Amino acid sequence: MTTTEPVRRGGEWLQSWNPEDEASWNSSLAWRTLSITTFALMMCFIAWFLPSALIGKLNAIGFSFTKDQLYWMAAMPGLSGGGLRILWMILPPIMGTRKMVTLTTALLLVPLIGWAVAIQDPGTPYWALMALAFLAGIGGGAFSGFMPSTSYFFPKRLSGTALGLQAGIGNLGVSVVQLLTPLLVGFALIGTPQVLKTPGKPDRSVFYQNAALIWVPFVVVGVILAWTLLKSVPIKANVRQQFDIFSNKDTWFMTLLYIMTFGTFSGLSAQFALLSANLYGAGNPAIVSGAGAAAKVLVAGYQVPDPATFVFWGAMVGAVARFAFSPLTDKMGGAIWTLVSGLGLIASIAFTMTALTPDTSSAAALESGFQRFFWGMLAIFLFAGIGNASTFKQMPMIFEKRQAGGVIGWTSAIAAFGPFLFGVGLSLMGPVAFYAIGVAFAVLCVALTWWRYARPGAPKPS
């Protein structure tokens, strides 16, 4: 990608940029851009998945929602995130990296402050919380703008590493918000406390608004860094030109593969806590009856697990796998690792299915089932993370530079519907049927990967 004449004027716009020319490539600018946008992307994921860390506790702090209402609320950030990604995917060539990252990061303040205010009042109506869940999707939409924008700054030989680092560390925002929320709510920061009622434990005062407010200063820092230190690559691509990716069948094939990987990662990250509670926790009426101080554990000797103490492991495993395997995709190619990802997902989803119908006959049976469920879920996150890295290596290799950015944005947009699809699927079908569909879809994706990208003599080796 070379611009021989200025496309945009002003200090923000680079007048000539060709990362494939190693002699002229400004690597320090590229890595600085990666660092700042990755920090901002982590803030985006924190805002996007903040609802998933709060929704499972709403009823325990005084709200009164049905199981289906909670599933839909947990699904809403995925619906809006996917829709907004379709918008964000066309922004990099139009706005440039600097303006896009600055404005997007600033918009995160709306859902963060909104959740901090709403969660303090159990009288907050359902529609208001659904609206805040929708606005959290701004953080999800950002991904399909940030990733293509970053791809403009790096040569193909480093694309897997650069995009893997940005996406993987950005994805860590999911784990960070799920890990830190239980710790942050234990002390007074600002606002009124809530009373947390947990089966078998005494009531205690908590401050769930902290889980949102603590990130506000970091978001402000991200806005300042983006505005003062980022530059923009002048890519010649209007909206019509960007949408020519849809005439390329590999756009649709890679969309399916990224749904398998990131759709699984984002969908399970959003639903892990709620699914755990409904299968092995207080949401299963065969295990716990009543609520609050009156709650009674029906299976003698069973210690009801608190999802807040373990769900962060899923997103952490997936995110670390994404950036840990990225250098391997640069060395070995992405297609072979996408194949590994698909095969691993088939095995791990099938294994987890054995634990989706809890045996409530005894504490030992429940604990055994929970262990299979937990480790099976971590295996799913691991193989989804590997596939997230490998597919992002494949796209810059399959498509020309201008198209690669658009394809990255489009596939990211569709896969971001994962939390919505998983929420709706789990609510309407139940876990067993939904996971069975997941196995069948992974089989399809493995066959596609082998035929199109991984086999000897494949049409598009990548």
Image (tube, rainbow, N blue to C red):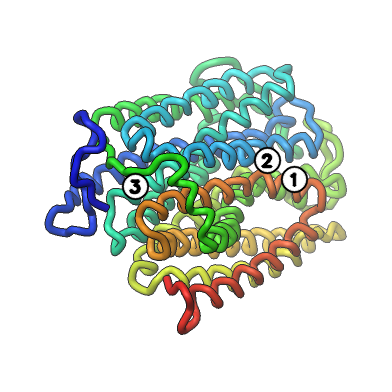
Q: Position of residue 25 (x, y in %)?
A: 17, 53
Q: Is residue 457 above or below residue 329?
A: below
Q: Are marks 1 and 2 in contact (CB under 8 Å)?
A: yes
Residue at the (61%, 34%) spot, across then down? 51
Residue highlighted by disc 3: 150
Residue at the (25%, 37%) spot, across then down? 7
- Cα separation between marks 1 and 2: 7 Å
Q: Position of residue 251 (x, y in %)?
A: 52, 58
Q: Name which residue type carries label 3.
A: Thr
Looking at the image, is mark 1 or mark 3 nearer the viewer? 3
Q: Is residue 368 above or below residue 39?
A: below
Instruction: Assess disc 3: are there few (<14), some (14-19) or many (≥20) residues with their C-alpha within 10 Å of its C-alpha.
Output: many
| Local SS, label 3 | helix
Looking at the image, is mark 3 or mark 2 nearer the viewer? 3
Q: Position of residue 2 (x, y in %)?
A: 23, 51
Between 34 and 156, the one nearer to me in the picture = 156
- Cα separation between marks 1 and 3: 33 Å
Residue highlighted by disc 1: 424
Instruction: Tell me the number on the disc at residue 75.
Output: 2
